[in-house]
Image (cartoon, rainbow, N blue to C red):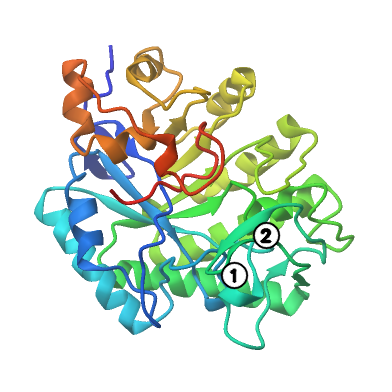
Amino acid sequence: MTTSFDPLNLAGATLNNRIVMSPMTRSRAYGPDQTPTEATAVYYSQRASAGLIISEGIQPSVVGQGYPNTPGLHSSAQVGAWRRVTDAVHEQGGVIFAQLMHTGRIGHPSLLPDGLSSVAPSAVAADTKVFTAEGLQPCVTAKELTPAEIEQTIADFVSAARNAIAAGFDGVEIHGANGYLIQQFLSDNANLRTDEWGGTNQGRIRFGVEVAKAVTDAIGSHRVGFRISPGNPFNDIVESDLSGLYGELLTALSPLGLAYVHLMEGPDRELTLQLRKQWQGTFILNPFTHPNPTGLDALSLVEDGTTDAVSFGALFISNPDLPLRLQQGGPFTTPDPATFYGGDERGYTDYPALG
């Protein structure tokens, strides 16, 4: 029987265990260059016993930023700062992927340089609020991307992926979840397009698939993961035909030979099992455990074959040595929801504050 503490072959790289640190936005990249600090290097190196660390969301371009003090991978200063982080993780024997997160219509003009605005599949404002330096602000109507701007956005993901490898990351995770740009293209209410980038399931999945194709061509499929959250309503997302939509998405991604698919689960375990059966590569599951954080019980999901690896979010904040504690059956320091910036306790947002 396979357990969470057995090694995992991830597209040719051997992970020491099957416990994954989930991406969690930290908003700790200060200054005009929006670079991670020395504290960031300490934070991730302390958690290097995870089989795989997936970093906080990193914007692939200036316009991809949707929250204050989030880091980028679109400048030489950012590449150099991230190199200090990845070196620290590797010195502790860890493996770390950079999550590339373009927030799309989730953002606010105050977060961007003058003259820039958030972009989206369609000019439809999200019915939600975002954090800014002035507090919570409602999202404004984003600019609808033209076909040429869509191609440029794909190129931005490619450039950021190359920068991630230059910064020492072992790979990248393309963020197609949590109501950000790629999931906005997938959704019924954020994507009202009738051209080849919308309308049908095939059109809705096209942007995410083209990003994945371009990134794998640039850095190799063994260095690319893809995160999804079918049916996740966070950030005002509405999706219908989840089985068909995400079935088509995984079918289109399968020939690329990605390192993994990372599913952030909703309450429908049957959909999870369908997608798990369909995906022939490595499958990482962030299980639905509402209202509690993912805990010890989730290890059974590897043992029964539901997933190849399990990702943990909140418990990694309060338990940096989480794999050891899981192996020993505890004890666990309980994360305090009051330390989270926002969102629900189930973890749709993943915005824990740095303690």
User: For mark 1, does the 10 Å Cα neighbourhood hold few (<14), some (14 to 19), or many (20 or more) residues?
Assistant: some
Q: Nearer the viewer, residue 135 or 143?
A: 135
Q: Position of residue 314 (x, y in %)?
A: 38, 36
Q: Quadrant of residue 328?
A: top left
Residue farthest toward the right in the current orientation of the protein: 194
In the rendered image, is residue 235 in sight? Answer: yes
Q: Secondary structure at mark 1?
A: helix
Q: Secondary structure at mark 2?
A: helix
Dot 2 and dot 1 residues touching (CB under 8 Å):
yes
Between marks 2 and 1, how big is the CA–CA gap? Answer: 8 Å
Q: Amino acid at mark 2?
A: Phe
The label shown at residue 281 is: none
Q: Amino acid at mark 1?
A: Ile
The label shown at residue 154 is: 1
Q: Horizontally, is 178 left or right of 88 in the view? A: right
Compared with 28, 183 (above or below) is above
Q: Position of residue 5 (x, y in %)?
A: 21, 24
Compared with 78, 309 (above or below) is above
Q: Position of residue 16 (x, y in %)?
A: 19, 35
Q: Horizontally, is 268 left or right of 53 in the view? A: right
In the rendered image, is residue 7 in sight? Answer: no
Taking the spot 55% from the left edge, 30% from the top edge, the residue there is 265
Q: Which residue is mark 2?
A: 207
Compared with 85, 239 (above or below) is above
Taking the spot 34% from the left edge, 54% from the top edge, the residue there is 97
Taking the spot 36% from the left edge, 79% from the top edge, the residue there is 31
Q: Nearer the viewer, residue 162 or 112?
A: 112
